[in-house]
Amino acid sequence: GLVGVKGVFNSFTRGTGFMHRAFQAYAKYRGPLGTVRKGVLVSVGRGFITSHALMSLEARGTLFVSPGMETYEGMIVGEHSRDSDLEVS
């Protein structure tokens, strides 16, 4: 199946790709689909986010935060570009 391909495509192209789709036919059920789990960037402490810290993290994944935001320990601040989780400060 192609369920979830659009999300993977958007992640791979970082939202700059174009996808066209057309329905072709129904098919028999072939069992459950596998899951894709991306790793996350997790804050290891409290504080305020600096632009310097974000510059070093941009290469490691997609960030959900911006400079000046307050963080807490365990807060997910981004999506890691790999399958594993990464603790960041």
Image (cartoon, rainbow, N blue to C red):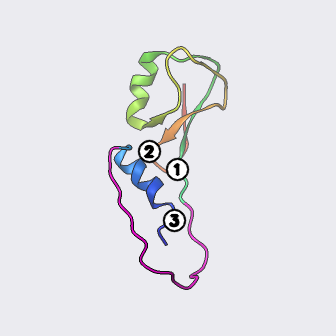
Q: Which residue carries the number 3 mark? A: 3
- Residue found at x 49% / y 72%: 1
Badge 1 amino acid: Lys
**In terms of depth relative to the viewer, which is nearer, 22 or 30?**
22
- Residue found at x 33% / y 44%: 16
Which secondary structure lies at badge 1? loop
Cα–Cα span, label 3 and label 1? 16 Å
> What is the x, y in percent for residue 84?
52, 48
Quarter occupied by residue 58: top left
Which secondary structure lies at badge 3? loop
Q: Which residue, as the protein is rendered here, is positioned at the far left?
A: 17
Characterize the local packing of mark 1: few (<14), some (14-19) or many (20 or more) Cα atoms within 10 angstroms.
few
Q: Which mark is residue 24?
A: none
> Position of 5 compared to 77: left or right?
left
Do callouts 1 and 2 mark residues in contact (Cβ within 8 Å)?
Answer: yes
Mark 3 vs mark 2: which is more N-terminal?
A: 3
Mark 1 vs mark 2: which is more N-terminal?
A: 1
> What is the x, y in percent for residue 73?
67, 27
Characterize the local packing of mark 3: few (<14), some (14-19) or many (20 or more) Cα atoms within 10 angstroms.
few
**In terms of depth relative to the viewer, which is nearer, 67 or 84?**
67
**Rendered view: 22 above or below 59:** below
Mark 3 vs mark 1: which is more N-terminal?
A: 3
Q: Which mark is residue 38?
A: 1
Cα–Cα span, label 3 and label 2? 21 Å
Cα–Cα span, label 1 and label 2? 7 Å
Characterize the local packing of mark 2: few (<14), some (14-19) or many (20 or more) Cα atoms within 10 angstroms.
some
Instruction: Give the residues in magenta.
Output: 16-35
Q: Which residue carries the number 2 mark? A: 81
**Rendered view: 89 above or below 28:** above
